[in-house]
Amino acid sequence: MKTQFHFTTRLFHSVNTKVKATAAILLIFVSHLSFSQSNTLSAGLWNTGSNWSAGVPTGSTNANVNHIMTINTNISVSSGDFIINKSVTDLAGGTAYNLSVSGTGGDQGNFDVYATSLFEGTCSVNSNGTLTVRNGDTLTVGPSVFANNSTVVVEAGGTLIINGDLTNNNNSTGISINGTLIINGNFSGGNGSAVTGTGTMLTNGSLVTTGSGSVFGSTGDCNTGPCSGNNLCVTNTINAPQTICAGLAPTGLTGNTLIGYIYKWQLSTSSSSTGFSDITGAITQNYAPPILYTTTWYRRIATTVGCTAASTAVMITVNPSQWIGGTSTDWNILANWCGNIPNSLTNVLIPSGTTFLPVITGAISMNDLTISPSATFTKMATGTVNVYGNFVNNGIYTDNGIYTDAGSVVFTGAALQNISGITTFNNLTINNAHGVSISSTVRVNGILTLTLGNLATNGNLSQNLSNGAIAGTGTGTTTGNIRFFKTIWGDRYHYLSSPLSVNTVADWNDNVTMKFGPYYNLYTYNETVPDSNAKVGWTTVTSNATALQSMKGYALYFPRYTYTSLLDVSGTYTHGATYLNNTLTNTVSTTPVSKPASDGWNLVGNPYPSTIDWLAASG
């Protein structure tokens, strides 16, 4: 609402009767002001009345956008305040809607952007209208005209992007850029117009002013884009873009000589127009960048009295450290790499078609590891692969380790990591407090160690229990289903239990046919059955619906006509759960004396997803 409206309202409600009459006169005097306000009630289409507390706002309405809205109409603000607290955007691929902000009479229309928003149509700020883009937010519009004493403000940290030309007419002090103005087109400033502020102004096309029109205090022109509004008072240039491999230092950057200017170099890892920060100690004409691991933009700021000029940013493109395999399969030979031998900061690409492909026999580290289609990456039994970023297998990953080896693939990053591509690991270790997510089919044949953090399986993980297991150590966790499977020999009984608490006998019945009478093949043991012969305690399981209990053992006969069977169960697994912490005791029974109950024998299941080798057991 307007300042005058708040003023008269306070008078009307807070003073005595005599003053109330005066307030009434004042209210009549300002009766042309907007009294209505409409707030969003829910996300949805802008032009749907039920999404607003008082209907779709008109140009004279005060509107508060507190939900994400989709623009399906032109928006025109004439005397109201439109406060954009949540994003408003055009329908993707639909009609390009326009934004217009102006004033009516002595009133001022305001469009205040506190959330990233997009209009694909034109933008007009005219006749005392005000457009503001706040710190940390971005407004994107189409071709734009700012005219007739309108006000456009981009705060420090804010960004205004214009996809098209911008014309600035008759705004002597009306455009203030303390953040970033990006014009994907040409800029034209009329006589007497001005762009002020301490921010950045960039164009793809020309940047031209007429007469006394100025940009950041300069009346100079840039007739061929790209142009910088910060570079009009003097020509400030640095040399060309480069492409290097990760782990190398680019060629030094050189700038033209400017007499009487102070230099300051800046860098950004975001883009050529945003995210720049000063480089400590970089205050000379030229600059030698250090070893780089990510694409980086550099620019030079030159300053003297009355003139500050920013050069066009130069991009140093950093490709992943690429294996070239020109000498051998040895990871640690420099000649096998474009760039230096990788470390934990390096993104690594393994391409196909090289003379040699890597074979890992020791400990190595990298950030991201990407294996290209048809490329191979081989880890030997003694190899350990420390991954600090993402693992992307589009080729062939071969793991020649066995479960007794110390060699493992270890995920140990400082942010959430992802495993993608069909892969079989022998030993896999999760050691990342931020977690690891599996987005493709992954199988672990050996030991899965949950040292730290959550492993989100997304139903994509299979754990082989024939020689493998989930290690009982570590404080890590899992979410999502895990498939546990084991190959079992036929023509004998096997003692089994389920590592999952959600399974029933039916989950085994799909692997080996259960028999429920008159002959049975699945038993539990009950010590309370009275008999002097311990064998009498075997009790049949009579239904597929019987729940498989953790810590409870089962004896299952696998038929002789099946040489081997693949037994599997799937479900969620709780790592580190305590299943039993008391002592199993024998309660002596004396009735009848010849057949005592509670004989003391118990068939206890292994609650952990692993095989027990009784010949190897100790302690």
Image (spheres, rainbow, N blue to C red):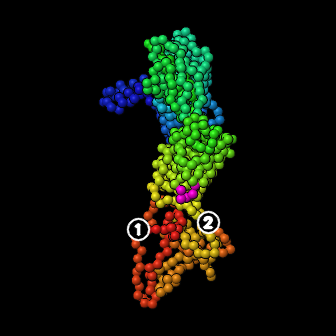
Q: Is residue 67 visible?
A: yes
Dot 1: few (<14), some (14–19), or many (≥20) neighbours within 10 Å?
few
First in sequence: mark 2 vs mark 1: 2
Q: Main secondary structure of the magenta part?
A: loop
Q: Label 2 is placed on what type of residue?
A: Thr
Q: Position of residue 446 (x, y in %)?
A: 56, 58
Q: Nearer the viewer, residue 561 or 550?
A: 561
Q: Position of residue 18 (x, y in %)?
A: 31, 27
Q: Specify whether 271 is left or right of 433.
A: right
| Residue located at (63% from left, 31% from top) | 96
On the image, numbered disc 1 is attached to which residue?
A: 581
**Quick one: SS at disc 2?**
strand
Image mark for residue 487: 2
Disc 2 crowd, CA 10 A, few/some/many (<14, 14-19, 20+): some
Secondary structure beneath label 1: loop
| Magenta-tinted stretch | 401-405
Q: Nearer the viewer, residue 267 or 200?
A: 267
- Asked if residue 522 lies in the magenta stretch, the reply is no
Mark nearer the viewer, 2 or 1: 2
Q: Residue at x 44, y 81 (%)?
A: 598
Q: Quadrant of the N terminus?
A: top left
* Percent x, y of residue 180: 51, 25
The residue shown at (62%, 17%) is 224
Q: CB of mark 2 within 8 Å of CB of mark 1?
A: no
Q: Is residue 350 above or below residue 164?
A: below
Q: Which amino acid, mark 1?
A: Asn
In this orientation, does residue 439 appear?
no
Q: Which image quadrant for residue 204? A: top right
Residue 128 vs 565, above or below: the answer is above
Q: Report x, y in % for residue 365.
A: 53, 44
